[in-house]
Amino acid sequence: MLRAYRVAAGVALGAAAFLSLPLPALAAPPVAPGGPAPGAADPGATRSWSAWRSDGTAWLAADPADSPPDGSVIGWRFSVSPEGAAGDSPGGELPSFASVCGRDTAASGHKRVAVTVDFGDGDADAYPGDQPPAQGVLRCVAGAEDATTARLLASAAQVRVNDRGDVVSVSGYPMRERGGTELTAAAPATPDGPPGLLIAGGAGALALLTAGAVVATRRRTRAPAEARR
């Protein structure tokens, strides 16, 4: 009887001590020595820019060297990307081509693409001590039909790539990536040469015809006057 009483008392004391602990202490996972605090950015995690393309309902992983067709919506996101795994897709509402670029078609031989840039979460994706830009990028850009996803990005923001061609910074972010080479933008859409020349030639011919008509009118007006003399 005495032993049963002691066991019951021990259980009661243990339960009371457990319940007296603060809730955060109960919920917080153990922190490894030298590791990041829960919820904080891991300084040793791999981070990178990843390319995406919308299918109209969701983001699909894309290759920066791909050449998206006219009317595409492409996205870029900076995020933690564990080895062998893709980073996160752009957040927020999925943009539509019509809302960004309108419904006009591109000039012949060129394309228009909607480009969005997500600089990532300042707490989970940014390097410790770094702060992403307050706003992302959402622009309609134009380029040649063979312009790649990376070069279309360079038409929307300043882009730097490493010696392998990987995008390492967009609009100067992240700040620690100061090396690399600036990527040139996709060629902007301009009117094609032959139609432009035809228009210019037609305008010149019209000007000559107008001048000829004026001269002929003056001659007809002058002839009766000379006959009356």
Image (cartoon, grey):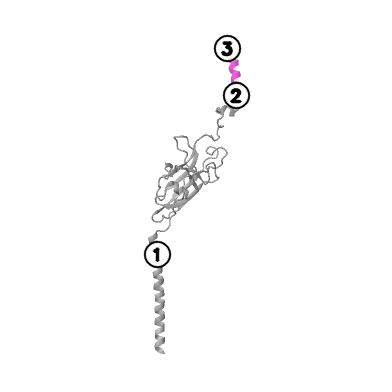
For the residues labelled 2 and 1, the Cα–Cα distance comes to 86 Å
Q: Position of residue 64 (x, y in %)?
A: 43, 44
- Residue sitting at 59 percent across and 21 percent down? 15
- Residue sitting at 40 percent across and 89 percent down? 228
Q: Is disc 3 placed on a helix, strand or loop?
A: helix
Q: Is disc 2 placed on a helix, strand or loop?
A: helix
- N-terminal of the two: label 3 or label 1? 3
- Residue sitting at 39 percent across and 67 percent down? 202
In the rendering, which numbered label is found on residue 19? 2
Q: Which one is in front in this view, the residue at disc 2 or the one at disc 1?
A: 1
Magenta-highlighted residues: 1-18
Q: Position of residue 205 (x, y in %)?
A: 39, 70
Mark 3 = which residue? 4
Q: Which one is in front in this view, the residue at disc 3 or the one at disc 1?
A: 1
Mark 1 = which residue? 199
- Name the amino acid, label 3: Ala
Of residue 42 and residue 14, the one placed in the foreground of this image is 42
**In the drawing, does residue 78 fall left or right of residue 71?**
right
Position of residue 13 relative to residue 65, above or below, is: above
